[in-house]
Image: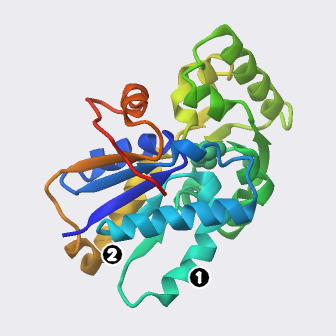
Amino acid sequence: MGAIGVFDSGYGGLTILEAIRQELPNHDFIYLGDNARTPYGSRSFEVVYEYTLQAVNRLFDMGCELVIVACNTASAKALRSIQQKDLIKRTDKKRVLGVIRPTTEIIGNLSKSKHVGILGTEGTVRSNSYAIEVAKFFPELTVHQHYCPMWVPLVENNEYATEGGEYFIKKDIEAILSMHEGIDTIVLACTHYPLLINQIKKYTPEHIKVISQGPIVAKSLKEYLDRHPDMNALLGKSGLCTYYTTENPSSFDRNAHHFVVGNVHSKHLHL
Ligand code: DGL
């Protein structure tokens, strides 16, 4: 039986995986973090596409029937090409889904003021994917976007709960809030950012909702599987989860406990 693959440039996708496993506790998962080549946020379209395609193909080779690209940067820069150019060449039914579409499908329901802030990596913000997708579902919404270049390195290096880390978090929150006084909802449009939630909330006025994507993506995946029983039938349901990293497994296991309940025993994989 096949597994659901969950891919991220590093640790961030674990925030998505955890939420998905709460929604689908019996399904089998393979997580792959490309920690050796993180961050993706400042890389070109071509490179993010190449790396993401390598990871997706490897997850397919390892038996995944469905891969969730649990990284906004890769969803913004590579997903459409993979779906339209690469999947189409396959004769099987393997599928790849991202994290931007499920978020933009519901985001307009959360904002009363119709001014939403998007915090992401440089790659996600410059791709303008959020504004383009939101316009399809909620044309009345104004999207204000800001990128936070230091936030992923703060997470990957476990430096976010420090004085230096908080300096950057405060600075970027102030920057997005200064874009429009009516912003009432902020989307953490990078899967690493929910790890910073305590620091983010400290500098965000209470009336502003701060949205993490994990539960949104998890609910959307469950609905997808309900709509696609043929795909669901191909998926193993023994509650297994295996972790792979392109970096050192022992440091992955040490850092992963910030994201995951319980112990992680990852294996090394070369892409
Ligand atoms: N976690 C990824 C995202 O959601 C970005 C991390 C990176 O820059 O590699 O965009």
Q: Is residue 223 above or below residue 214?
A: below
Q: Say few, some or many: other residues with alpha carbon within 10 Å of mark 2 (under 14 / 14 to 19 / 20 or more).
A: few
SS under mark 1: helix
The residue sitting at 49% across, 81% down in the picture is 87
The residue at label 2 has a CB less than 8 Å from ligand 1: no
Disc assigned to residue 84? 1
For marks 1 and 2 on the same chain, the one whose residue lies earlier in the sequence: 1
In the displayed orientation, state which residue is furthest to the right.
Answer: 179
**137 with respect to 180 (left or right):** left
**Disc 1 versus disc 2: distance between alpha carbons?**
21 Å
- What's under tag 2, amino acid-wise? Arg
Q: Nearer the viewer, residue 168 or 228?
A: 168
> Residue 8 appears at what percent x and percent y?
51, 50
**50 with respect to 11 (left or right):** right
Residue located beneath label 2 in the image: 227
Q: Ligand 1 is found in which quarter of the picture? A: top right
Q: Is residue 18 above or below residue 232?
A: above
Q: Is residue 239 above or below residue 206?
A: below
Would residue 134 be visible to someone looking at this image? no
Q: Nearer the viewer, residue 57 or 68?
A: 57
**28 with respect to 141 (left or right):** left
SS under mark 2: helix
Would residue 160 be visible to someone looking at this image? yes
Q: Say few, some or many: other residues with alpha carbon within 10 Å of mark 1 (under 14 / 14 to 19 / 20 or more).
A: few
> Residue 262 appears at what percent x and percent y?
26, 29
* Quarter of the rendering containing residue 209: top right
The residue sitting at 51% across, 48% down in the picture is 34
In the displayed orientation, state which residue is furthest to the top.
Answer: 163
The residue sitting at 59% across, 68% down in the picture is 79
